[in-house]
């Protein structure tokens, strides 16, 4: 049941659907879940546009920030102040905001009157000088910080000296989907009677999908009915800089190994309902990502919470989520290991089903309705604590110097 909150207005700053990126999906889901759990509170979005003209946002979006326009960050802060925002929830990821190391977001934070709760989608253990300066002021100007993994919590304390009492550990939220047998969903995608491997998400070279393709011939030799579904459009930033080179390279690998009949590329960004149906059809979910320091993966959280048996490289989020036999970890860029573990799980139905059951049961703790309640607790605590004292910190002075050096617009 929804619980009454003292917070009347909550603003959410971050990318927002229909922009195609993980942060946009997360911000949209978080706002929607908080609004559903607390209908007495007014929730609105303040997204960042990376293209001229922005996106056709829904009514929940009340103001837009232009990524490279420093003045629009001030205007957004003034809008939220005039809207009497009780709390501002900021989604932070390097690359969202303009300026050196995303320093434009600091202008927004300096102008806000309401306490800020910042969700850190990336926590760098070894930031460069500009990233460290931005992080230091971001931390100083946030009343509370949210991380999604224990590793993120540890790095904040060790690398940035953040007091533990300022950090909230809130795992990535997931949709609430039923626990279903994969065969119940396969016919609608034309893969009935086949063993289905799935990877989904926006494509870019750091996803490591080529290593699954290199592993597939060994899998097909034992399981000739296997099919690997790669679901997702090319990441917009990748598309603008290098076009479809990565996807075309993956298709070339499939042809080289003569496994075209065992690979399906779905080149599109799917909405939640269709995504859950694709997930439902998967016997195994694979995340072969190459960046060890990836501290959050929404795709991994979704697949795990849907009760999928997961094989993954040991990037930070996967290493933490899949421990204690909740999944299988393989070395980075190791097709032989991927092939070995895929074949092993496809052979061992009992083990695969036990893994699915453990994942699904744990995932119930992080469905969006539960996650929204934990976020609202963090928001209420921040409201009681109040915004940090408005003083110009050393980090702020250094950040201003960086912006003067590189230009503000």
Image (tube, grey):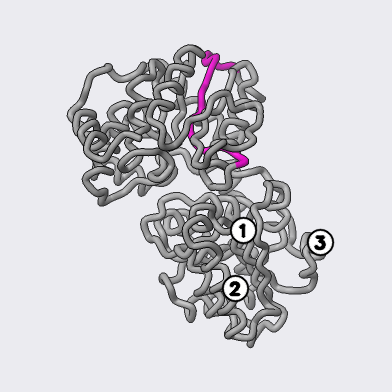
Q: CA distance from mark 1 to mark 3?
A: 18 Å
Q: Residue at x 62, y 52 (%)?
A: 360
Q: Earlier in the sequence, mark 2 or mark 3?
A: 3
Q: Earlier in the sequence, mark 1 or mark 3?
A: 3
**What residue is shown with label 1?**
232
**Number of numbered markers:** 3
Q: Earlier in the sequence, mark 2 or mark 1?
A: 1
View extreme (left): residue:
394
Q: CA distance from mark 2 to mark 3?
A: 24 Å
Q: Residue at x 36, y 25 (%)?
A: 109
- In the image, residue 169 lies at what x, y percent? 42, 38
Please say whether residue 147 is visible from this viewpoint.
no
- In the image, residue 355 lies at what x, y percent? 58, 62
Quick check: 317 left or right of 233? left
**What residue is shown with label 3?**
188
Q: Nearer the viewer, mark 1 or mark 3?
A: 1
Image: 201 above or below 57: below
Please say whether residue 154 is visible from this viewpoint.
yes
Magenta residue check for 11: yes
Q: Residue at x 52, y 13 (%)?
A: 6
Image: 109 above or below 57: above
- In the image, residue 313 lies at what x, y percent? 45, 66
The front one of 142 and 131 is: 131
Residue range corresponding to the magenta coloring: 4-18
Q: Residues within 10 Å of mark 1 (few under 14, many from 20)?
A: some
**What residue is shown with label 2?**
345
Q: Residues within 10 Å of mark 2 (few under 14, many from 20)?
A: many
């Amino acid at each position: 049941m929804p619980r009454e909150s003292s917070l009347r207005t909550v603003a959410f700053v971050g990318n927002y659907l229909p922009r195609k990126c993980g942060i946009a999906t997360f911000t949209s889901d978080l706002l929607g879940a908080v609004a559903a759990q607390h209908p007495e509170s007014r929730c609105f979005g303040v997204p960042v546009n990376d293209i001229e003209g922005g996106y056709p946002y829904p009514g929940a979006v009340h103001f837009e920030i232009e990524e490279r326009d420093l003045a629009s960050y001030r205007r957004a802060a003034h809008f939220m102040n005039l809207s009497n925002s009780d709390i501002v929830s900021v989604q932070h990821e390097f690359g969202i905001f303009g300026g050196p190391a995303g320093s434009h977001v600091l202008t927004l934070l300096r102008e806000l009157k309401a306490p800020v709760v910042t969700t850190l989608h990336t926590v760098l253990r070894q930031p460069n000088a500009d990233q460290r300066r931005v992080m230091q002021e971001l931390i100083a100007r946030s009343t509370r910080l949210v991380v999604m993994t224990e590793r993120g919590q540890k790095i904040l304390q060790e690398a940035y000296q953040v007091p533990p009492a300022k950090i909230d550990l809130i795992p990535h939220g997931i949709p609430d989907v039923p626990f279903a047998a994969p065969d119940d969903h396969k016919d609608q995608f034309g893969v009935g009677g086949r063993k289905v491997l799935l990877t989904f998400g926006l494509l870019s070279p750091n996803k490591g999908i080529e290593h699954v393709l290199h592993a597939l011939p060994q899998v097909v030799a034992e399981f000739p009915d296997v099919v690997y579904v790669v679901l997702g459009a090319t990441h917009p930033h990748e598309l603008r800089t290098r076009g479809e080179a990565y996807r075309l390279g993956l298709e070339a690998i499939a042809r080289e190994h003569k496994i075209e009949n065992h690979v399906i590329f779905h080149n599109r960004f799917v909405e939640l309902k269709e995504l859950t149906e694709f997930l439902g059809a998967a016997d195994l979910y694979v995340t072969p990502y190459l960046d060890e320091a990836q501290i959050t993966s929404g795709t991994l959280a979704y697949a795990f919470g849907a009760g999928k048996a997961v094989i993954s490289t040991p990037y930070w989020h996967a290493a933490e989520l899949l421990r204690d036999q909740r999944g299988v970890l393989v070395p980075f860029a190791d097709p032989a290991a991927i092939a070995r573990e895929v074949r092993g799980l496809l052979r061992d139905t009992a083990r695969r089903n036990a893994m699915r059951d453990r994942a699904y049961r744990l995932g119930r703790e992080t469905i969006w309705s539960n996650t929204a309640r934990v976020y609202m607790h963090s928001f209420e605590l921040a409201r009681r604590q109040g915004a940090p004292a408005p003083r110009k910190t050393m980090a702020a002075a250094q950040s201003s110097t960086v912006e003067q050096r590189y230009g503000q617009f």
